[in-house]
Image (cartoon, coloured by chain):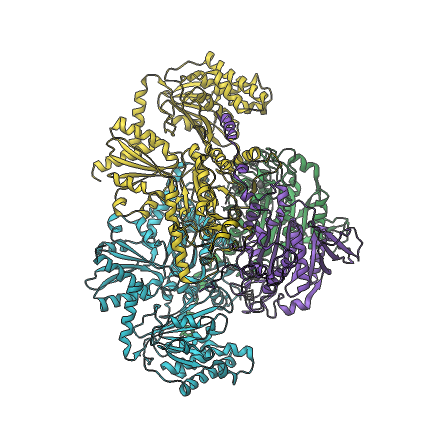
Chain colours: A yellow, B cyan, C purple, D green
Amino acid sequence: MNTIGDKIQNKVSETSVQTKINDIVIHVATANGSGSQSANTALLRSIFQMGIPVSGKNLFPSNIQGLPTWFTIRANKHGYVARRDQIDLLVAMNPETATDDLFKMQPGSLVVYDEPLKLDSLRDDIEFYPVPFNELVKEIVPNAKLRKLVRNIVYNGIVAKLIGIEMAEVEEAIRKQFPNKPKAAALNIQAAQIGFEFAAEKLPSQDKFRLERMDKTKGKIIIDGNAAAALGCLFAGVTVVTWYPITPSSSLIESLIDYLRRYRIDPETGKATFAVIQAEDEIAALGMVVGAGWAGARSMTATSGPGISLMSEFSGLAYFAEIPGVVFDVQRVGPSTGLPTRTMQGDLLSTAFLSHGDTKNVMLLPSSPEEIYEMAGQAFDLAEQLQSLVFVMSDLDLGMNNWMADPFRYPENPINRGKVLTAEQLEKLDDFGRYKDVDGDGIPYRTLAGTKHHKAPYFTRGTGHDEYARYSEDHQNFEVLLNRLNKKFETARKLVPKPVVEKMENAKFGIVAYGTSHYPIVEVRDALQKQHGLATDYLRLRAYPFTEELAAFIDQHEYVYVIDQNRDAQMYQLMKIDFGTKRIGKMRSLINFDGLPLSSDRVLSLILNEEKDSKNGR
Amino acid sequence: MNTIGDKIQNKVSETSVQTKINDIVIHVATANGSGSQSANTALLRSIFQMGIPVSGKNLFPSNIQGLPTWFTIRANKHGYVARRDQIDLLVAMNPETATDDLFKMQPGSLVVYDEPLKLDSLRDDIEFYPVPFNELVKEIVPNAKLRKLVRNIVYNGIVAKLIGIEMAEVEEAIRKQFPNKPKAAALNIQAAQIGFEFAAEKLPSQDKFRLERMDKTKGKIIIDGNAAAALGCLFAGVTVVTWYPITPSSSLIESLIDYLRRYRIDPETGKATFAVIQAEDEIAALGMVVGAGWAGARSMTATSGPGISLMSEFSGLAYFAEIPGVVFDVQRVGPSTGLPTRTMQGDLLSTAFLSHGDTKNVMLLPSSPEEIYEMAGQAFDLAEQLQSLVFVMSDLDLGMNNWMADPFRYPENPINRGKVLTAEQLEKLDDFGRYKDVDGDGIPYRTLAGTKHHKAPYFTRGTGHDEYARYSEDHQNFEVLLNRLNKKFETARKLVPKPVVEKMENAKFGIVAYGTSHYPIVEVRDALQKQHGLATDYLRLRAYPFTEELAAFIDQHEYVYVIDQNRDAQMYQLMKIDFGTKRIGKMRSLINFDGLPLSSDRVLSLILNEEKDSKNGR
Amino acid sequence: MADRQKVVTPNPALKLNQAGFDLGLYKGGKTTLCAGCGHNAISERIVSAFYEMNIDPYSVVKLSGIGCSSKSPAYFLSASHGFNAVHGRMPSVATGALLANRTLLGIGVSGDGDTASIGIGQFVHLMRRNLPLVYIIEDNGCYGLTKGQFSATADIGSTLKTGVVNDFQPIDTCVLAIELGATFVARSFSGDKKQLLSILKAAIAHRGTAMIDVISPCVTFNDHEGSTKSYAYVQEHEEYFGEVSFVPYFEEINVDYEPGETVNVTMHDGSQLLLSKLPENYSPNNRAESIQKLIERRTQGELVTGIFYVNPEEQNLFDRLNLDDAPLGTLPQEKVRPKPEALDELMAELM
Amino acid sequence: MADRQKVVTPNPALKLNQAGFDLGLYKGGKTTLCAGCGHNAISERIVSAFYEMNIDPYSVVKLSGIGCSSKSPAYFLSASHGFNAVHGRMPSVATGALLANRTLLGIGVSGDGDTASIGIGQFVHLMRRNLPLVYIIEDNGCYGLTKGQFSATADIGSTLKTGVVNDFQPIDTCVLAIELGATFVARSFSGDKKQLLSILKAAIAHRGTAMIDVISPCVTFNDHEGSTKSYAYVQEHEEYFGEVSFVPYFEEINVDYEPGETVNVTMHDGSQLLLSKLPENYSPNNRAESIQKLIERRTQGELVTGIFYVNPEEQNLFDRLNLDDAPLGTLPQEKVRPKPEALDELMAELM
Ligand SMILES: Cc1ncc(C[n+]2csc(CCOP(=O)(O)OP(=O)(O)O)c2C)c(N)n1
Ligand SMILES: Cc1ncc(C[n+]2csc(CCOP(=O)(O)OP(=O)(O)O)c2C)c(N)n1
Ligand code: SF4
Ligand code: SF4
Ligand SMILES: [Mg+2]
Ligand SMILES: [Mg+2]
């Protein structure tokens, strides 16, 4: 990838001779558990409060304390929030990585560092800003243990002064970080001020990067995808939640527990209108979801790769016995335990076919907090409409990073519980067959346990059964059943969220992507058009099975790039399975699987490489 | 399917005006646990002993006693052993199914039945042979409980007389059934003789079907696929065997235990050179295989669909940490618990991608006892050569039914333990990196625990690691690792068994199939050529990943049919994933998923339907 | 072809119980288990217990794993919803189902393979949670459905028909359950109609996890010499832990009682349980003592039956979760979707 | 970039033990656990125990599941093969590894989440099999690596930093292990260097499953009031079950002894274990009594440490399988592939 990628970066660098306004990538290198998270979030927030579009990505190790951690903030006036490979301003706090980090910087970039690290002796093409952090906090925090925690926030002040973040916003942002701890807030604000003053007095100023107030974040919120998903579940009326902790999905459930405790204790009775169970493992977690969904609850669990693998057997049961339930898969890097704190879209193929035999699953593909909030609601509706599991395929990048978002909309539609028959409805029916395709859409009717009518009870099983839910080893019953399940999957195609298509005039090719690949693509499409004269169309997938729009999109283009964040081009493979040769012939796979949030630079270089290759008649 | 299928059947029927010699399908309907298994196996054997090619298929319920069971014997002079839809001779012993069974018979066919069932009143286009079974055995077995068990063997005598099986062979076959119980053998022989005499005296003879001694089974054996697999493991030098019982794989392990106890107690020490553990579940079974494979054992387990699902997490660990092991999947009908006593090739897709993240597995595809015997050996060699799991994808039809086979060959090659470094070898090396691609084939070297050399120890993990097996979250290490694993999979392509290709002159199209689909295809290719003037070529897949022969085969033909015994055309899908549009464009999927052993009639009708459709320019 | 009749319709011609339900609703489909299988006897007791306890069959859910034993829910309570889950995982499915609708009465049937081998993890955690559920292990010391392999409750030294000997100590599910916090733990024998019926009734009345290990010989694979679970062996070796008889809706009897006497434990529905107290100072509400007793008698090779431990006071899972009284699964939208103001409030906090 | 040095090369400059191995070979990589984590103290004791016991580090395998605790094998015994398996499944991997090579000395490290939640099934069955393995639970009552959620050994009523209260009774892995047939069961505290070292040495010398539950406070997530696993709580509440000290290779002392005295259990390698016998008539080889004692003291809110149960006579898994003395994994082809005559014989039978 490197040659082209480098060229692009150089190009960007070349244009930076004048001051860049509201366009900067800040990289803060600290150690895990050193209290840097509050400092970084406050830094992000202060920029956000100035009205400048901003995003934050945390690159953290799979341990609890002491290992290197990086936080990248990108502020961009155009609203580009994807990761960039190039960093403009490094804050080097971690002795372990400082040298490595420094040598990754482009010439001319800015480096704030902890003075004892003496980084300035290592390179002479960098603008260095040494800061004696320990000295600065000593005055205000005599206790050495506490000091370690406050030390980081000093760089908020330094960076503020250096690139023009307003101190009032820095203070406000810090206060937001400590909503119920005014003392801690005050101390931190003091530390930031010390940093600001130090920078003002002792550090040279620079004119390469400058932040200026604008109005692009007004009315927006900052939220991580897991919390957004949790809010979606809250308003979807989830009633049974099960889980087994696993990074990066744990915070989805932990946020949800907070929300449920706050909003779902019945004011009249003082009792909970929900149940949360921390299960003994993921097998039990999905088993409980299945049991609850069967008995009528809106049930869900959240997990990541290893959990998905363990859920395989129950996934097949839910498919075959037709039981609703929602599973959030906040994907991380696999195979196996892999890199638990890195991001990847690696579970698509295994989830689509999760279980032995002919099992097929529905997946939703959110790419933003707004969308995962809404898809959470859709997932519960779809699960009950289809009487099947619905997997919401998030990833670590979406789930655990901070995103700017529009405030979420209150659900427009009432909750859709699908085809459930009450005692009254049963009374009117001549005949009720649990697995009968009455409506021709492959979706049968069901009754809930406890329905007081003699037609209601049926026996659910993962073994062969006829339309009346009776045990059957008859091969014709079996074929009918499996064909109907296929038909239901076709119906799912019509019910799942449609892709989002964005077009440009005279597009040379199409791009198909999904999930968090969205952000680099937005930026790259602009770059391709502006810098390379290449207009493109873009289809963002939002669900599997695919809807007809995908086929149409392929048909409309000479060729389309399919972008996957995994090694095996999993979405591309699913598309190959679905399509005929004409469409397959137009598909070109582009992949990235380094576990980092997909960067614009990477996507651009992948596409340009291909374009060059095809020009050279490969 | 039916119209064409019917036509074919009719055609077959029309040709049967004269006596058919050594060409008959016998169907015995009894109840589970009624002692019919010995009777049926003896019946099969008696035909086999007459030198006539024969096969037996047991269609049994998922219970232990009392439910309907059918045993189909096909004797065929050409050696066709596939299931046929049409039955020539029915032995109706089970009151529960007798009527249904009767109405499935073609006009003119023969029905032996238990007299009290009075079947002759139901149809008049059948040749009926009523037999008072209870009366007949009463004389020789006064004990009523025992009588039930002996009752069945009477029909061996009846059928023998009716179609010309020599009584000496019947007796010999019964003796084989009770090797260490001469009394039981004698009683059963007596009962069969009573049947024979009754038929001779009281039943009309018939001239539609006749068996005559030939010499086509000389030197052959009769064995089920599970026992054959077990023998393969025995001679492959398996040392650690783990299992959790599940139909239809249990008998593979149970046979293996018998063989191991017999041949693998060291005569010098009296100690076992193997360990068998009945694990608490399939997760533990594969965990033990992985632990044992890691520490140097030839380790294996056997399971079926639900077990495969449960093995998902460990499959990913073995893939990523590169640990050898062999898993037999004796496939049954899924999804979920499905039809546990029916056959299907339903686990290919989920096994190929078994585990989250980018996991890919090697599969072998046996289609006969000889082959599963040999592939068992190959599987252990491959697993150790590739340092990965190897899944041997058998099915219930192969595993649990009786097959005629050539005697197995003693392994030609010594056991291949792959790239294992001893202390002496380590001493000579400058450098040992457990995950280093030294040879350029993607396969690293390993050391076994207990190797007394300071370079030997390394740390195995499912988390990210570098070439020296050290923990690493570095994204470049990760990419290198995943790319090497891909390269290893490419190497696997060269090591796995190649497909078997059979050609005819001027073939119009090719057929691609695998496993037990082989038998109907052999017959159907002859039928297509002789009865429809259609010459065909045939490639029988024996492994995944695919070898270059498959691509070449597709290239050589205008189009190829790909035959799957599952709903989702799983092998076809795997081929689609692997190939480009040119080849995909030539592939046509044919499927069957009724859980019955694939019949020749079904395959023929599927192909003729397609051929007709393509003629009609569909 | 399966039988075309799909539901058991109420048949008022049959004798009704006090709640007005006829016996047919409590019966199930025709068994497909082996003739003489202990599991069938248990199904019959279940039918009687629910019928005689006047339980509304439409408010019952019956669940199971996989195995011969796990098939039995098809053979009782045809008017109840049933769920034959996957092998060893009934506890989680039951937990979900009852959380979705706490007004249901749950009965779970499992086998010793289903519970003590593949399912031991879910068993352990179910016992800890005290989910209101009658949990029956139909315990034959083998895997019936897969043709007789040893399960983890097979006695050490017992042999398969093939001659293979079991080298491992059996798991005592009763000791485990008591230790793990189950609030009702008993053992019975499928052939002992009277005792089993009494225990079942007590279990049905209990408002927490009621675990009953029912020794239920497999006539086909485990009824041979060398097996300690065979009918003959059990009948020889069985010994009563205490005389158990169930007295529904009688007046309350004091639980404070002396050794050698009889104790009444008051159940939550007001029905009571009469136990003969062992002279050895056995008390049905002392965890440590009942475990000790069980282990002691086991060490002496005795098979003890009876109710070992009952604690009707312990909070059950619903209490612990402070669960709404109405079934969660059918709460109306107003109860489960917070008002728009809630969203506004949340959004404001995130701005 | 990870550190480029890949193996710990022997360093004779360091002090050698009697077997001639230097201490460096017993040490591991630099810990990445939190400063002050109890797990690190346990790693240090493991280093000392193996060094002082003169165990050839190349003949050791160290295995673990997933969690902070399960990372610790990377921090000891760098000269031993290691295997960090998947969450909760170390027992099966260890079983396989040791069956493949019975001459290896196995040490497995797990967490309370790894063992008592997801892994309880494999734990139960490992205990039954008596596989020779030192099995250490680094028990902090929480899931450290996923940021402090309750595990199944969290005490009832203890609270998370967020204020969430645990409603469920903890699983007592020691009681379970004894009941299930483990032949060496002990509990210690990561901060008690002397006792832990003694117990570890005894465990290493044991030829069966040696299960040690080591209370090991999580300083980051579980060291706060309300948690009974915090240092302060443990130091306040801990109480010794008996004074334990390990005496390697001394002459054999009789095990027949009186209450209030001291008992020596002779281990298989000839080394011995010295136990102070409790006045309450405690005996380290009576299952029922030690369980009773444990439950009793637990009921009184006491945290007992010491070796609760030892049975050096019980057949281990290798004995039960009549396993060859040589490692199965490296048996030569002659030993594992039957002769051609065997195949001929088998084929003849099938004809
Ligand atoms: C995951 C999985 N593994 C294995 C099986 C095969 N299987 C079916 S029933 C059974 C054992 C049943 O034993 P038990 O629970 O004791 O019931 P029983 O038949 O003895 O009543 C097994 C292993 C399965 N269905 N699913
Ligand atoms: C299948 C699976 N589920 C969940 C996880 C996430 N996970 C990692 S460690 C852990 C718990 C660790 O707790 P414990 O064993 O007590 O170790 P500790 O960190 O407390 O030492 C969990 C749930 C995982 N790695 N794999
Ligand atoms: S095999 Fe055994 S457990 Fe199964 S139905 Fe028959 S007797 Fe019962
Ligand atoms: S989080 Fe807790 S258990 Fe994990 S390393 Fe830190 S102190 Fe230890
Ligand atoms: Mg059983
Ligand atoms: Mg823990």
**Total labels drawn:** 0
Find residue C194 and report its horizontal and vertical position in percent: 68, 63
Asked if B134 appears above or below B458 in the picture, the reply is below
| Residue at 66 percent of width and 47 percent of height | D246
From the viewer's side, name the closer residue of C173 and C338. C338
Asked if D94 appears above or below A393 in the picture, the reply is below
Residue that sits furthest to the bottom in the current view: B201
User: The N terminus of chain A lies in which quarter of the figure?
Assistant: top left
Confirm whether residue C240 shows in the render: yes
Find residue B211 and report its horizontal and vertical position in percent: 34, 80
Q: Quadrant of residue C235?
A: bottom right
From the viewer's side, name the closer residue of C302 and B231. C302
User: The C terminus of chain A lies in which quarter of the figure?
Assistant: top left
Q: Is residue A468 left or right of residue B534?
A: right
Asked if A56 appears above or below B403 in the picture, the reply is above
Find residue B495 and report its horizontal and vertical position in percent: 33, 55
Q: Quadrant of residue B19?
A: bottom left
From the viewer's side, name the closer residue of D14 and A329. A329
Find residue B567 and report its horizontal and vertical position in percent: 37, 55
Asked if B6 appears above or below A500 in the picture, the reply is below
Confirm whether residue B165 shows in the render: no
Q: Is residue D39 left or right of residue A212?
A: right
Q: Quadrant of ligand 3?
A: bottom right
Q: Quadrant of residue D69?
A: top right
Residue that sits furthest to the left in the current view: B506
